[in-house]
Amino acid sequence: MRLDTFFDTFDQLADAPNALPRLRRFIADLAVKGRLVAQDSGDEPGDALLNRIRAEKQRLFQTGEIKKPDELPPVGRDSLSFELPPGWTVSLLGEVAVCLDYKRKPINGTERDLRISGKDESELFPYYGATQQQGWIDDFIFDQELVLLGEDGVPFFDDLRPKAYVISGKSWVNNHAHVFQGILASNRFLMLWLNTFDFTGRVAGSTRSKLNQAKAVDIPVPLPPLAEQKRIVAKVEELMALCDRLEAQQQERETRHAALARASLARFAEAPTPANLSFLFHPSYAISPADLRKSILALAFQGRLVPQDPNDEPAKELLDRIGATKEERIRRRVAKRVAVEPNPNDDTSGLLPPGWVWTRLGNSFDVRDGTHATPKYTTEGFPLVTSKNIYSGSLSFNGVNLISEKDHREISERSRVDRGDILFAMIGSIGNPVIVDTDREFSIKNVALFKYYSETDSEPRFLLFYLKLVAEEMRAKAAGGVQSFVSLGFLRNYIFPLPPLAEQRRIVAKVDQLMTLVDKLEAQLTASGATATKLLAAIVAELTAA
């Protein structure tokens, strides 16, 4: 398969993750390895070009136009991971380009002011940093085509994101980018090479990767004949223009598909049936499974997922019965009386279906929390579950810390956990509610515990689905600076739409049915994307071997 044929069939590969960025990277890989354009035996060889580059650098040094060239170690062809084409040689970045000093003052000798001075943009010049244009600024340092290579804050180990780019014209560059200018070498070819280079072993730093100048100048560089460099750059620009067209077409399709998706979602909202759900997974405009799951839960708690039955016991009677059970448990000292705001007034907004009532979580459920202190850890004892142990809808004891029986009993006096209770992270990653499905004894820290005043009058999974739906809103309202948290009072006073118990059970069954279908459709989408990824990889391999 030829590369132009590849472009013609790209629609078949568009479902592959990052298909266009991967295509752009593939083009660059072919280019810098001499596989994009043909070699011409009449071109000046790379060795001869390299000799001219060395002579030109000496001339520029002698005339004072550049500082003394760096003394660089010798480099061999084995420094590259591929075989060089005929006429190519290998050099170092600091040999084929000069690293310019960007820390000097502007020509007029005044200090540089990074603030925008209120001038029209036509009087200002682009200001560049490690990741392309940052803004506009007074005055300028450079007035030529240059290669900028990121120094820090750059995705050095991301194959699909650029580390270097070319600028031209009057510009100012901050100290987060190395500035190179090719000497008798194409700046744009050097940019292509730097964006495909493996920086492993050259970048330091754990929290913020940094490439110092010494590690930058001795990057090995393949050097084709200058005429071939220009042919390569021209071909890459031609192919990247095709990529731009493909990207524009994709964006246009996505705009149309988004409109179709909204229409399909509205259709599903009016009639949330499995048949209408499948419309949301049309290959051309599939709504993300995460968004669809959220939509299903939103419909559930608006009373639009299943029909209301006038024969159901009204939720107000259910709530009165839960309240009576709550008072009885308080009288028997099984539960404690806690401050909870009164339930909201009767619904006048029309948001609740007939038979539903507004209440608060603390008036419908016994909401507690675990310890906030950290007991001494032991090698044997009882698990201390924190927010890190509840994720992906399940409770995990992997890596859990243990505490003594004495500490466990003290914590359990206020927050004993039983099978069927619901846990909810209160700090950090707020949310991730799970139903306890084990009889193993454990304590909790910075985790809310939802127990039932009346187990016979509660549907645990209805509460679980509600907590999943509102967790994002709770995170948005959470307090705290470095680490956000929700208080026990916040959770107890959080409003809760309560349907009749029979309707709760119908809603849970319907949510289960639709979520199972979403899981299956998501698996199909994943398989489709995996197939497109494999097809893309196979075609790339074929082109590479050609």
Image: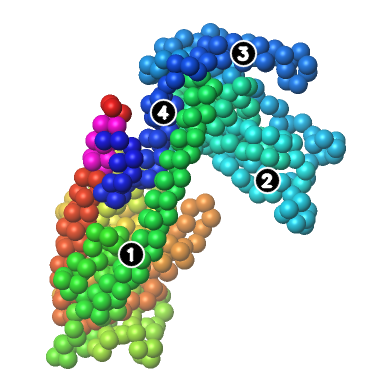
Whether residue 135 appears in this view of the structure is: yes
At mark 3, the secondary structure is helix
At mark 1, the secondary structure is helix
Magenta residues, start to end:
533-543
Residue at left 75%, top 57%?
A: 120
Query: Which callout, 1 or 4, points at the residue further toward the start of the chain?
Result: 4
When asked about the image quadrant of residue 274, the answer is bottom left
Question: On the rendered image, what quadrant is the C terminus found in?
Answer: top left
Image location of residue 266, percent across then percent down: 29, 76
Query: Which callout, 4 or 2, points at the residue further toward the start of the chain?
Result: 4
Query: Which callout, 2 or 3, points at the residue further toward the start of the chain?
Result: 3
Q: Which residue is mark 4?
A: 37
Q: Which residue is mark 3?
A: 52
Say whether marks 1 and 2 touch (CB < 8 Å): no
Residue at left 61%, top 13%?
A: 52
Whether residue 290 appears in this view of the structure is: no
Query: Which callout, 1 or 3, points at the residue further toward the start of the chain?
Result: 3
Image location of residue 350, percent across then percent down: 35, 89
At mark 2, the secondary structure is strand
